[in-house]
């Protein structure tokens, strides 16, 4: 599942079936700190600060999040995370030689608190109190820097949803000061389209963070959560969301309009980590539905050539 960049993961499949229960809050709380280092990052107001890392994990995390690093003391309301060391070998038995791209992660949603577990990492997150603890077992099957990033992805997904935004399994491109999202499941063409793009800057080819401004207008936020795309420097800042396009690879390029109930269903199906929890939080689904009410959500059929922008522009100009 890892790509060529240290600490990065390309989300393909998250398996939750037949997984062990995440460790209890009490068990994680009783563990000693992993180290005495700290680091923090900020994604246009969504920030996470870590304490208790060892030197190696702090160094690898700082490299991975370099464009988004902040002084922990400068953040006004971050998710504050304490890192612990567990003497256990692992939490989930590794599937050595298993299917490529298969990553086992279980999330237990307890309303205001989440518990999660993967091969060598377990955590709890208190969303109401903006506090969390994460523990690492001794196994190196799942490198700590990768597990830490997956913890960040889960946390960002739930925090964004509670703030009226979302974390979408989609590529995003900033062009002319506005952002465009192209989403879909694996093999729909997100990375392909990002590589075909000849205009603007690719924010991500895999996972896109969307946050509202104080008026409720949605913006794409620069973030480090790319997949395999390595072109250009990491993008920071906020860009108004112009439109969202569900990708389908085809023999010609055109835009298709479908009923809103279907487009919303497609969006929800491509919200990693949180989509199974929306049934427990109907108020969050309603908030998401309201936030997207004025954003065009269209189906983009495209062929593998860099001529999709005129079709996108014409579709958005048509209302």
Image: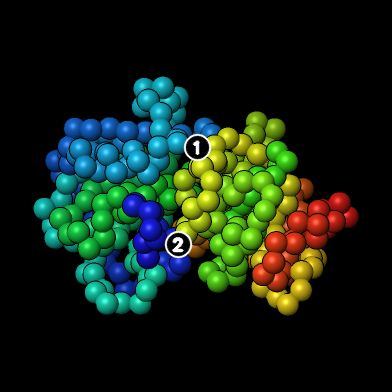
Relative image position of residue 238 (x, y in whole percent) = 61, 36
Earlier residue among tags 2 and 1? 2
Instruction: Give the quarter of the image for residue 133.
Output: top left
- Vertically, is 301 above or below 289? below
Relative image position of residue 7 (x, y in whole percent) = 34, 52
From the image, tell me which residue sits under label 1. 43
Secondary structure, mark 1, is: strand
The quadrant of the rendering that contains the N terminus is bottom left
Give the residue furthest to the left: 87
Relative image position of residue 116 (x, y in whole percent) = 33, 56
Secondary structure, mark 2, is: loop
Label 2 neighbour load within 10 Å: few <14, some 14-19, many 20+: many
Residue 11 is labelled as 2
Q: What residue appears at the point 66 percent right and 66 percent down from the top-left corner?
A: 247
Give the residue furthest to the top: 74
**Do we see residue 186 in this rendering?**
yes
């Amino acid at each position: 599942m890892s790509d060529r960049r240290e600490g990065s993961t390309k989300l393909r499949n998250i398996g939750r079936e037949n997984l062990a229960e995440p460790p209890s809050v009490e068990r994680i709380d009783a563990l000693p700190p992993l180290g005495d280092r700290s680091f923090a990052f900020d994604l246009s107001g969504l920030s996470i600060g870590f304490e208790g890392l060892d030197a190696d994990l702090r160094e690898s995390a700082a490299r991975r999040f370099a464009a988004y690093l902040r002084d922990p003391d400068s953040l006004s309301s971050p998710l504050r995370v304490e890192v612990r060391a567990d003497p256990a070998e692992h939490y989930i038995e590794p599937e050595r030689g298993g299917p490529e791209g298969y990553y086992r992660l279980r999330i237990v949603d307890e309303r205001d608190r989440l518990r999660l577990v993967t091969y060598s990492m377990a955590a709890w997150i208190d969303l109401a109190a903006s506090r969390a603890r994460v523990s690492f077992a001794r196994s190196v099957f799942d490198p700590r820097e990768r597990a830490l990033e997956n913890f960040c992805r889960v946390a960002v997904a739930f925090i964004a949803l509670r703030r009226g935004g979302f974390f979408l399994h989609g590529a995003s491109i900033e062009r002319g000061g506005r952002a465009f999202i192209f989403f879909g499941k694996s093999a729909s063409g997100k990375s392909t389209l990002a590589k075909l793009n000849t205009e603007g800057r690719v924010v991500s080819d895999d996972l896109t963070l969307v946050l509202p401004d104080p008026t409720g207008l949605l913006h794409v936020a620069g973030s480090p959560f790319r997949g395999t795309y390595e072109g250009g420097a990491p993008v920071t800042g906020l860009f108004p969301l112009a439109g969202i396009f569900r990708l389908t690879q085809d023999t010609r390029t055109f835009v298709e309009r479908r009923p809103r109930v279907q487009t919303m269903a497609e969006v929800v199906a491509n919200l990693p980590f949180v989509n199974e929890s929306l049934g427990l939080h109907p108020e969050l689904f309603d908030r998401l539905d309201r936030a997207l009410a004025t954003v065009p959500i269209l189906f983009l059929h495209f062929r593998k050539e860099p001529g999709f922008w005129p079709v996108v522009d014409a579709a958005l100009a048509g209302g």
